[in-house]
Amino acid sequence: MPDSPPTTRPADAALNTGLGRVLLFVYGVFALSASARALVQIATHFSEAPLAYLLSALAGLVYIAATVGLAIGGTRGRRIALTSCSIELVGVLMVGTLSIADAIAFPDDTVWSRYGSGYGYVPLVLPFIGLWWIWRHRPTRPTPDAE
Amino acid sequence: MNGPLSVATIVAALVLAAWFLLRAALNRAPGRAELIATAVLGVLVAVLVIVAVIGLFDGSRPQETATFAGYLITTIAFAPVALYLAKMEPTRWGNLILGVACLVLPVLVLRLQQIASVTVA
């Protein structure tokens, strides 16, 4: 679509515009809160629940990676975002289940504990929206009709 | 931390959030008024944070001072970052960014109050 006027932007112009920019913001917030929380937990009382806090730190890193992927966009950004959103989905489901099944290993809340209930279940919903958005920007997509 | 300033910030943020989400639902891009409103909210939040920082130096401190400081930095940076992203996004999604920011800000203020209420002499 080289002739489309610059004032109107297609809804799916790029990974890091439109809804992608909203996702970037939300992922950025979670990158900050998850890693800050993990840092405090590891620095002050790591021995209480090492497994939970290491997973907490992993969550922080995953959110940081997703934020970076969404920010840089393009093929590489898409691949980074796809990988981190997939890990995020597995992580929130795994940690969410473990935190309910084994409350002793997870005495302190992390971002993914109880499927992210401490964060309004946004950590549970976010990977689905993220993966859907990335899937919509898959590179093998046939050329869309010009509007 | 529990003063009328916090209440005013929370109410203002929630009212703005409703407005921004409505504008996003109506497929409107953020206009000048929306950007200025966010900037004003950012100033209100900055005043709140400055008051809280001054409060750190008059005797009692939150037990988790490091966490409190982290939240203060996040809170003061929140509105400016949202404003920056919304200016890059002159579509309905710009309003959604502002709306999300205005929904998270009250949570941040409430968390600050929570952390501030557990003090050490």
Image (spheres, helix red, strand yellow):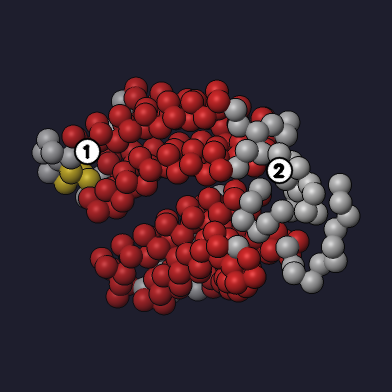
Task: Give the residue displayed 25% in from the left and 34% down from the top.
Answer: B50
Task: Give the residue displayed 42% in from the left and 57% down from the top.
Answer: A32
Q: Is residue B11 visible?
A: no
Q: Nearer the viewer, residue A16 or A111?
A: A16
Q: Quadrant of residue A40?
A: bottom left
Residue position marked by numbered label 1 in the rendering: B53
Q: Residues within 10 Å of mark 2 (few under 14, many from 20)?
A: few
Residue position marked by numbered label 2 in the rendering: A6
Q: Residues within 10 Å of mark 1 (few under 14, many from 20)?
A: some
Residue type pointed to by label 2:
Pro
Q: Quadrant of the C terminus of chain B?
A: top left
On screen, residue B19 above or below B117? above
Q: Is residue B92 visible?
A: yes
Q: Nearer the viewer, residue B93 or A95?
A: B93
Label 1, label 2: how far apart the Cα atoms are: 46 Å
Position of B30 with respect to B107 (left or right) is right
On screen, residue A140 above or below A21? below
- Mark 1 falls on what kind of element? helix
Instruction: Return the x and y of residue B65 as percentages of the image width and height.
Output: 22, 50
On screen, residue A129 above or below A11? below
Instruction: Return the x and y of residue A81 as percentages of the image width and height.
Output: 60, 67
Do the numbered discs 1 and 2 sit on residues whose CB atoms are within 8 Å?
no
Q: Quadrant of the N terminus of chain B?
A: top left
Task: Give the residue displayed 60% in from the left and 32% down from the top.
Answer: B30
- Mark 2 falls on what kind of element? loop
- Disc 1 is attached to a residue of which chain? B
Instruction: Return the x and y of residue A47 as percentages of the image width and height.
Output: 29, 75
Task: Give the residue displayed 46% in from the left and 60% down from the top.
Answer: A31
